Image: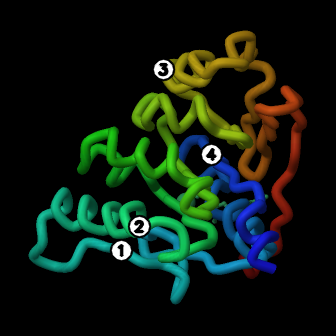
Amino acid sequence: MERDRLERDRRIAVIVGAKRTGKTTLARHLVDRYPGHVIVVDPADEWGELGVWPVPWGVRRRDALLRWLGELTAEGRGAWEGLLVLDDWDRYVAAVPGESWTDLLVANRHLGIDVLAIGHRPQALPKEALANADLLWIFATRERRARDALRDIPGLEDLEDAEIPTATGEALAVDMLVGSRVRVTVPFSAQD
Ligand SMILES: Nc1ncnc2c1ncn2[C@@H]1O[C@H](COP(=O)(O)OP(=O)(O)O)[C@@H](O)[C@H]1O
Ligand SMILES: [Mg+2]
């Protein structure tokens, strides 16, 4: 049991795409199937009791986020294990220095944390986060600069505009380890 826990491979997954293209819907689908503890950083308050917003009223965003990230990464394995979802990451990514996020992304395997980072402008996310992703889901992305930022990711230099979906609920699922790119439709029901 302990051995399984220690040897389980931890992943970094990134979802990008314009606003209202289905990113959170896919994240819910993945969270429902995740066999462990889940915390969602949820600035838009869309996740009910799974969601947290670690910035108490009256505390500066930077101070609150640095403290929260420090607690998550400093205590080492065992403090907390599971899936950390950074939904609407664009909204708070720039509030702390980029190294604070990359520390988390570099240490995630050692800490026992899977990370699912979600953003609408890839050019606003730390380059290391995109470069270290094991899995990437690309939703509709119309902005030229956003598409160019995707082509800056090692392994995606040849990404063609025609491969990028244009409809809500459609994604290009990229497995960075295998190098595969598959078009997927996110399962959706009206209650979602
Ligand atoms: N596969 C789909 N088909 C139709 N509508 C969808 C699908 N996925 C999501 N939606 C709807 O599109 C809207 C935006 O979805 P959401 O997942 O919140 O987008 P994002 O997180 O990218 O802003 C929501 O109203 C959602 O219910
Ligand atoms: Mg969303």
* Quarter occupied by the C terminus: bottom right
How far apart in space, not on screen, are marks 4 and 3 (Cα)?
18 Å
Front disc: 3 or 1: 1
What is the x, y in percent for residue 136? 70, 40
How far apart in space, not on screen, are marks 2 and 3 (Cα)?
32 Å
Q: Earlier in the sequence, mark 2 or mark 1?
A: 1
How far apart in space, not on screen, are marks 2 and 1 (Cα)?
14 Å
For residue 145, the mark is 3
Mark 2, Cα crowd under 10 Å, few <14 / some 14-19 / many 20+, is some
Mark 1, Cα crowd under 10 Å, few <14 / some 14-19 / many 20+, is few
Residue 176, picture quadrant: top right
Nearer to me, 93 or 100: 100
Where disc 3 sits, the SS reads helix
Q: Earlier in the sequence, mark 3 or mark 1?
A: 1
x 41%, y 67%: residue:
72
For residue 72, the mark is 2
Where disc 1 sits, the SS reads loop
Q: Vertically, is 174 above or below 4?
A: above
Nearer to me, 190 or 67: 67
Q: Earlier in the sequence, mark 4 or mark 3?
A: 4
Q: Which residue is mark 4?
A: 14
Q: Which residue is mark 1?
A: 53
Q: Earlier in the sequence, mark 4 or mark 2?
A: 4
x 31%, y 62%: residue:
70
What is the x, y in percent for residue 71? 34, 69
Q: Is mark 2 within 8 Å of ligand 2?
A: no
Q: Is residue 32 left or right of residue 49?
A: right
x 47%, y 29%: residue:
127
How far apart in space, not on screen, are marks 1 and 4 (Cα)?
20 Å
Classify the position of ligand 2 by quadrant: top left, top right, bottom left or bottom right: bottom right
Is residue 54 in view from this perspective? yes
